[in-house]
Amino acid sequence: MLIEFIYQKTNLFLLNSRLFSTGIATVISFGLAISLFPFYINFLRKFQMNSEFESKDKSVQPVMPAGILFLFIVIITALITVRFNSYVISSLIIYVFFGVIGAVDDIAKVVNKRRVTRGEISKQQYQYKSDGISASLRLSLYLIIPLIIAIIAYEYIPNINGTINLPFISITKIFPYLPVWLFIPYMTLTIAILANGVNFTDGFDTLATVPSITCLIFVGVISFISSNVLWSSYLLIPYIEGGLQELLPLIGAVTGTLLAYLWYNSPPSTIIMGDSGSVGLGGLIGILFVFTKAGFYLPIVGFIFLLEFISVFIQIGYFKITRKRFFLMAPIHHHYHIKMKKSGIYGGDFQIKSKIMWRFHILSVVLLVLGLVLFLKIR
């Protein structure tokens, strides 16, 4: 908004560039986060805002949640750099609402952890009371909020018309159209599944951060190219008019914030993302994939998030049927954690977690490259 206001007053063409706005958004959000995180961490530490039991040393125990600061920084940066339209407003609504739902759970975890410390409840009871919103209500909100946004978006955003881009296939050959009764559930479930998937992945320090950044880079590249009629025609991908490129500065704002978060959350972590960060990010990534008509590329670029979600789904379903566990523990990164610990090869818990995180990060970068190659060239 601010950058558009300055452009109108000065007529400086550089300020009208979406790439310039995206770069500025990334730098501003990174700078704000780097500057504010130390004060925010000290504030949370002062009030003992943590939900961990492992460390007795409060000076090194990570605090939470970083996601509340994420929301503040992204919104401030968006007000400076983003030109608001229906795409941006819909994305921000999902991000803010899901972030608030996660924040309620984060605060409840801290409160109930203190109750454990005071002896009011046991650690086992804490596992059942750690969430501020019941599982059924939370699941309902995960579905109801994106359902409302999907209905409104389908009605009022001209290019949200049910068309979907398929991997390996040129849109000149097949460009399937989903009728409203299929598209609305598809958009709703994509957002809800990604919100849960990112949340499940956020189990170790930084584990969900790099895959989130790679997903954001993917949808950023696609939104930029899809907004250009010549490039989209040459690459045989859907041309999406109506201001899709306005999402770029928003993507830059979130990416810059996550990069600053990596700075402070590099192992051993200083601050935890929390549900307010992971759930909000997941919802945002989900709606961005829908807007760019790239939902069928989520199993490729967002493979890690879907793997984490499916592992929990399988674990719960298998246990209900057989009363046995399919994985040693779910989500699946905990399965690998326990398996590697039992092997006795690695020196300790820190080494095992670092190994898992680095492998997930490397895999997410490879999947980003693969997704871009498939989307842009292999048809």
Image (cartoon, rainbow, N blue to C red):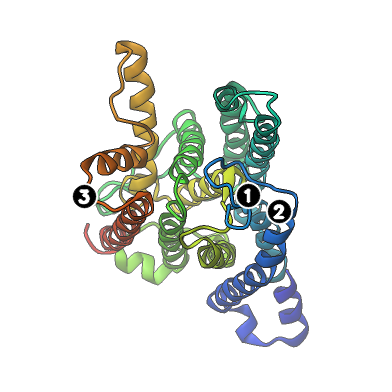
Give the residue type at disc 2. Answer: Leu
Residue 216 visible at all: yes
Q: Which of 200 and 114 is in front in this view?
A: 114
Name the residue: 54% across, 50% down.
Answer: 281
Tell me the mark number nearer the camera, choosing from 1 and 3: 3
Label 1: which residue? Answer: 64
Give the residue type at disc 3. Answer: Ile
Give the residue type at disc 1. Answer: Met
Relative height, residue 160 to residue 81 (above, below) = above
**Mark 2 neighbour density, 10 Å: few (under 14) some (14–19) many (20 or more):** some
Where does residue 372 sit, x and y in percent of width and height? 31, 62
Where does residue 109 sit, x and y in percent of width and height? 64, 36
**Mark 1 neighbour density, 10 Å: few (under 14) some (14–19) many (20 or more):** many
Q: What element carries label 3?
A: loop
Tag 1 and tag 3, C-beta contact below 8 Å: no
Label 2: which residue? Answer: 44
Rounded to the nearest whole Å, what is the CA distance between mark 2 and mark 1? 7 Å
Rounded to the nearest whole Å, what is the CA distance between mark 2 and mark 3? 37 Å
Q: What element carries label 2?
A: helix
Tag 2 and tag 3, C-beta contact below 8 Å: no
Label 3: which residue? Answer: 345
